[in-house]
Every structure is written in structure tokens, then in C-alpha cells.
Image (cartoon, grey):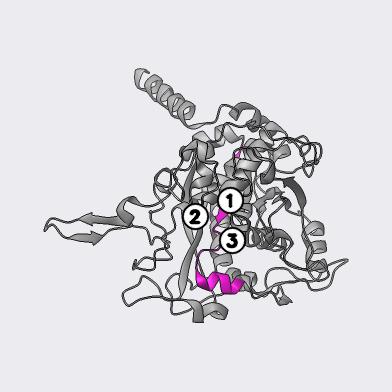
Amino acid sequence: MHGFFLLLVSLLVVVATTLPSDAATIAQRWAELSGKNNWEGLLDPLDIDLRRTIIRYGELAQATSDAFIGDPASPFVGASRYAPAAFLRKAQAPHPDLYRVTRFVYATSPDAAAFMTTRPGSWSAESNWMGYVAVATDGGAAALGRRDIVVAWRGTKRAAEWANDLDIELVPATGVVGPGPGWSQPSVHRGFLSVYASKNSTSRFNKQSAGEQVLAEIRRLLDAYKGENCSITLTGHSLGAALATLTAIDIVTHGVNVVRGSPSSSPSNHTRTVPVAAIVLGSPRVGDEHFKKAFESTPGAARLLRVRNAPDLVPAILPTPFYRDVGVELLVDTLKSPYLKNPGPGPAAWHSLECYLHAVAGTQGAGDGAGFRLAVDRDVALVNKELDVLRDEYRVPAEWWVERNKGMVKDASGHWVLQDHEEGNLAM
């Protein structure tokens, strides 16, 4: 009995030290915050719990950028710096014990192969690490009100991915979504589809496409937790937002979120639909009018909340005569922030994920007369992680998020060598 009491106290301590202070209301309102009613009545003014929810998922996407090895001198350029086991803690994601990473996701793209610059001895000449799948821990499930499965996609980092971004021809989304009642075969951005759906038999990381890896892991997790109340949440920024959008419709089109068996009060042969939500930031348009109709009309349709920064060029760069927005838009405006330089560094800052999250923390409405006040106490120093955008009086160095000594360490012989990753960082 004494041992059980200590275990219970320990669990409560772990939960208390890893959950946000708003956990109780978020747990009660999770379905509403995940778009059950398409976020009606929550956007203007921005509901405080939804504000925190968007930031939480945005930070899970930001972790993919923070952990990415981008230095071309590294043999591990294009990989994660950290292994899955303690990934969120190592990447310094807030509340790292809410989720555990269960799978890394890798992508390849034959259309951009000419832009893959690697050196002899590199970990892969064909693939890049693109994100991860995670599932709520027991403590996280208690705080979130359900067993949430998250897919976090990384934004553009490498030259090959820029090549994909610029490959804007619309092509049939074959294998992801097909024709249906009220729409013909949807077409999507060829570059985004290539990243999502391409395979490479010579790469041990991409015998399956990125999309296949994600769907297989979601199926596995839904089976593992089939007796629990589950949800699927997709998040990403920029290219990652586009990939999250493709993932959402891929899941519902192929019935991945329709599972047999339910919480113990229902018959074991009962089927139910696990809700799918995408919370994306800085997303370019992904597909045509038929894609929009399919996305919003497919049975068991995913809900998508698309956060757009008013001055950001990326969400509007693909022309509307050919491309259509999907989901519900939340408009924010970093130009209203008194914390940021004005004029600032321009398009890079307008599209920065950290600046997006700063705007979500402080937006007071979409109107021209709406002000800016940090309703969520999110550290303003974060906007300077990769840029020089914070006003000088805050005395935060520009571009301060760098590995100590860029990963160089002195070995036993006194020579400096590159050790910029931990063992297990190439896990599947």
C-alpha cells in the first residue's frame, strides 16, 4: 500500500510539473478546440484555450526546425540532431512530457534529386528527415482529455526542398485522394506531392514514402490504444503545413481513422471514426477547386485551421484561379506587435514560425483597429532564434539558436572534431 501511494504521488508530481496551467479546461474542451464545430465563435476574439492549443502544436512543429542539422559540413546534414527517445526534451520543446515520439519520418523526391548536395560519407544521398509521429503519454492523455496522436512536419530547409516548393504544376493527387460525389479527380502542387508520396528503393529510409510511413504508424498507434478515446492532430509550417494538409485528406480518404472497437462501454465489433484535425501555420495553397471540395466533403472530413500572418507572402503566392484555400482561416498580423522591429527584416520575418507563434500569443483581432497584447506569456526572445527581428532594447542576440561551438568538441588527443548529433538520431 505504501508503495502504491508513493507511485501515485510520483505520477501526480510528474503530471503537475509537465502540464500547462490551463490543462483542465483544455481537457474538457478538446473536441471543440480541435474543430468539432469548425472553430465557430472561437477566432475573433481568439479564445484563450484555442490560442494556447495553437501555440502548443506550433511548438511541436518548431521542434523539427530546432533539431534539424543544416550545416553542409556535417555528414549528418539533413538529419535530426537527436534520437526519438528524448527528442522533445533535447529539442527543448515546452511541456516535453506530454508526448513521446514513436517514429521519425523521412522523405525523398526524384524531382529534386539534382539539388541534393551531399559529400562522401554522408548518412544519405537520397533522403531527408522530415518530422515525426508522437503520441500522448499517460500523463499527457490525462491533461489533454484523450490519447492524441500528433504528426509534426518540418518546413523547407534544404535546396532540394526549395526546388520542390517551386515545382508548382498541378498534377492529379492519385493515391492520396480520388474523385467523389460532387468533385472530379483533385489535383495538387506537384512538388509537395513528390515530397509526400515518393519512394526510393536504394534508400533504407524511403522504401516507403513519407506518407506511407505516417499512415502505417497512425494505424499501429490506433490499434495499440483501440480501447481509448483517441484523436489525430497534424501540424506543420510552410512546406510542413502543405504536407500536413495532404496527410489529413489521405487519412480520411483511406479510412485510417475508422477503427474497430471502442472504449469498453461499447461492443467490441463497433466501428468509430477518430477525429482528424490539422493546425497549420504559414501554409501555401495545396490544391485546386476539386481538392478543396474533396477536403471539405469527404465522409469523416478532417478539420483544418490555417493560421495566416497578414504580411506573409507564402500563403497567397500560388494563384487563386488555379489553387484554392482549404479549411478555416485565423488571420494574425506581426506588423501590429510593439516588440518587433518596424520596418523589420521583411518576408523572412513575416513567414517565420516563431514570429507566427508570437502573433498568436498577442493578436487581439483581425480588424485594422485591433491592438496587440501578449495574452499568453510566451518569451519574446524566441523570435530572434533564426532572425534579427526583436527590437534592440530587449538586448537579445540575433540568430542565437546554434549548437555550442557548432558541434565541435575537443577529443582526448586535444584535437577538435565534429560531434553534432547523438547516437540513434537516424532511427526509423
Residue named by callout 1: 353
Count neighbours of disc 1 (C-alpha within 10 A) and say few if under 14, some if 14 to 19, many if 20 or more. Answer: many
* Residue 151 within the magenta-colored segment of the rendering: yes
Query: Reading the chain from its start, which is encountered first: label 1 or label 3?
Result: 3
Three-letter code for the amino acid on which mark 1 is drawn: Leu
Count neighbours of disc 2 (C-alpha within 10 A) and say few if under 14, some if 14 to 19, many if 20 or more. Answer: many
Query: Reading the chain from its start, which is encountered first: label 1 or label 2?
Result: 2
Counting from the top left corner in percent of width and height, residue 363 is at 70, 38
Counting from the top left corner in percent of width and height, residue 60 is at 54, 47
Quadrant into which the C terminus falls: bottom left
Q: As drawn, is 303 to the left or to the right of 131?
A: right
Query: Reading the chain from its start, which is encountered first: label 2 or label 3?
Result: 2
Three-letter code for the amino acid on which mark 3 is drawn: Leu
Please report contact status of discs 1 and 3: CB closer than 8 Å, yes or no: no
Q: Quadrant of residue 23?
A: top right
Element class at badge 2: helix
Q: Residue at x 76, y 39 (%)?
A: 43
Q: Quadrant of residue 391?
A: top right
Relative to 407, residue 159 above or below: below
Please report contact status of discs 1 and 2: CB closer than 8 Å, yes or no: yes
Q: Nearer the viewer, mark 2 or mark 3?
A: 2
